[in-house]
Structure formats: structure tokens, C-alpha cells
Amino acid sequence: MSLGPNITVVTTPQDSALRPAVWAWRARRPERGYEAMALLLEHADLTGEIRAAALGNLSWFAPNLAELFSSVSFAALVKPPGVRGSWFNPSIATSPDGGTLISVRSANYEIGHEGRYTIDDPDRIVRSQCYIAELNTDLKLEDVRMVREVPGTTTFPFPVRGYEDLRLFYVDDELFATATVRDRNAGGICHVALLRLDPSGQVKQEHVLEGLSPGRYEKNWTVLDSKTRLGQQARDRGTIAMVYTWDPLVIIEVDPDSGTVTTVVAGVATGLGLSARGGSGGVAVADGVLSIIHEQAMLGNGALRYLHRFVFLDERTLRVTASKRFCLLERSVEFAAGLVARDQDIWITFGTNDACSWLAKLSRREILQSLGIEGKVSVSPTPRSADDHP
């Protein structure tokens, strides 16, 4: 049974639960299709096949960011002359002097029809190169410089090379980033690397971090801003706080000098679903943490779409509240890697189709209202002592 291009409803005993999406598509009622699939995804006992079909179907009904938030505006982060390849998945950080630092990834492949990759390399090796740059008041990139690995770093001949998708952040006055690496082990398993960076782009120290599940492909950990309560506590202990998984909620701390990973919050059910993945960092907003996460939706032809949600973590109760799922610009491969709070706005940086980079600005108050947070707690974070721990 087909909903539209590349949407297939799986024939299973639970097929009737997916039929409202078929009706909604034919009746041109996207809100009804969204509601039916979102309700279905709340059931914890779904088979993987049904869950994947429901998420893929929901992607046809998900609104984009502009349909949900009237305050949003977009600006393209244009690739500077001299950079070869694509220009995508930017992250963003506020520097200690109040400036704005951007990181962007470039790679030697393109995503074509139905998600097929075309690699511009005679040996079919995927090569990524990351850059950092200053964002000026006109939202233009200045002083673009290449991120360079620690000299003598041990690598393996896996056909995916280089840092992927840096997430920039500061601890006091020092610049750090996380990145995904695949050529640091013989099997090509994804690991998260913690990088200590010189502002010039030179990596001064790299730690490939051990996750909590040996052999698991590790990506998309959410670094918590040191202005958040959990981030402050970690900073006081000389560590960096990160959300390891969003459902169940697992929070870890990483020692930046040794790379040692310690679990500080484990196994809190949030209802976001096992497919929820980190995206941006987590910033201090309204006595909690605001972040943006994503899920991958696969269509019947094997092509991927990404769906995003704002999430708010109440740091006292560890309760997580989520917005509706949405597209950023369009139904495609989109990936939000950066989020910062600026005055009364939230700035989001994201890539589209592993090719282009964007910055979105929208009202902090409008986001909080969509989460049911505004009016219940203050907008500014309240300082707390390092001993005040859930």
C-alpha cells in the first residue's frame, strides 16, 4: 500500500494502525497523518519494522521550522573561495570575548538520487576536512582556517578518513570540540574524539573516547554548556558533562586530560524512543538544558530523511520535554549540529544533503512556549552550588 513517492506501509498484523496515514495523504490532511504516526510511535512494544515504517510515513507529514515558528529566519553560510568539496554540518560556539565561532565540514562525496553516494576519489576513500571561522555581524565567515590533526596521530587504512562533524565548545577560555572518527581503529567503528584546539585550528590533544557499550558505533553525544547546572558541576570537578543517550537518559563526564569517561546519571526513561540521537550541544535556558536532537527516517526506496525535535531537560527532576518532530528546511538529509542562546534568540546551525550550511535564528520564548515551559520557570538560569546534584 503506497502513500506517495517512496512511502510504503508494511503489511503486518499491525497494518491497520498505519492506515490513517494513507487516508491523511489522500485527503491532504497532513496534521491528521502526523498525529496518527506520532501516536503510534509512543507505543513501546512496536516491532522495529513497524516503528521504521511509522517514522518514514511521519516524515511526509512533518512541518518545517518556518511552519512551526513564525520568528524564524535563515542565512546561508557560504563556502569561501579555495575550499574544495562540499560545505556542511556546521556547529557554533560563543567565544569568551562574545564573538561567534563556526566549524564546517567539507568532504569529497555527494549524495545523489535515493541516497546513493558518489565519491570523488580514485580509491573510493571518503575524506573529510573540517574548518573553523569567525562569524561577523553580517553573518559572513571570516578568517577561515583548516583544522589540523596532532602530528603523528596513529591511523588505520579504513576508507573513511578525517574528522567528521565537529561540535565546538569552550571550557572557560579554552576551545574544545568533539568529532566522529572512523580511522582510529582497524574495524572502522565510529568513535567520538575529544579535541583540544588552538584557535589557529591546530589540534593540541586528541582523546578517542571509550563509550559505555564495547563495539557500539558512537556518534552524536550532546556536550552540556558549562553554564548549565550539570555542566557547572562537571567543570568544578575538572570534567566535561555530556548526554550519552537521550532514551534512556545517560549522562557522562569526560576528563579532558585523560579521556576517562564516568557515568553520573544512568538509565532514566524519557519516552523519546531509542531512535533519538543527539545533535547540537545543550545550552542553559529556563533552569534547564535546551538542545535539538534528530531521528533518521528511512523511506521504502532506502533514502534517508532526518527529523528534528527541540528537547528541554529539567536538571532537577531529569524530566525531558520534547517538541513536535519537524524538518528544518525541507524533507531531506538535514543535520543540526549547533545551538547557542543569544540574547532573546536561539541560533541553530545545520547542514542540508551533506552539501550546504545554514544558520537559523528564532525566538527563545517561542521555543519554550512550544515546549510548555514558558511561564512556569524563569528564562535565566539560576546559579547553584557544585554540591547540588540530582
Image (spheres, rainbow, N blue to C red):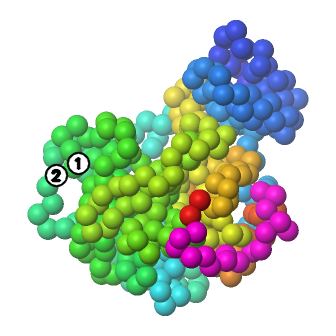
Q: Is residue 370 left or right of residue 280?
A: right
Tag 2: amino acid: Thr
The residue to which callout 1 is attached is 183
Closer to the camera, 172 or 338?
172
Could you tell me residue 20's position as x and y percent?
Answer: 82, 24
Closer to the camera, 84 or 47?
47
Q: Is residue 378 magenta?
A: yes
Considering every residue shown, the one lying at the far front of the view is: 387
Could you tell me residue 36's position as x and y percent?
Answer: 80, 30
Judge whether 108 appears above or below 273 on screen: below
Categorize mark 2 by other alpha carbons within 10 Å: few (<14), some (14-19), many (20+): some
Q: Which residues are magenta?
A: 371-388
Q: Is residue 332 visible?
A: no
Identify the residue at image location x=62%, y=79%: 383
Label 2 SS: loop
Tag 1: amino acid: Asp
Query: Label 1, label 2: how many angstroms apart (C-alpha)?
Result: 5 Å
Asked whether the beta carbons under mark 1 and mark 2 sit within 8 Å of each other, the answer is yes
Q: Is residue 295 magenta?
A: no
Could you tell me residue 242's position as x and y percent?
Answer: 47, 59
User: Quarter of the image containing the C terminus?
Assistant: bottom right
Label 1 SS: loop
Categorize mark 1 by other alpha carbons within 10 Å: few (<14), some (14-19), many (20+): many
Q: Main secondary structure of the magenta part?
A: loop
Name the disc covering residue 155, or none.
2
Judge whether 177 appears above or below 133 on screen: above
Q: Residue 369's image quarter?
A: bottom right
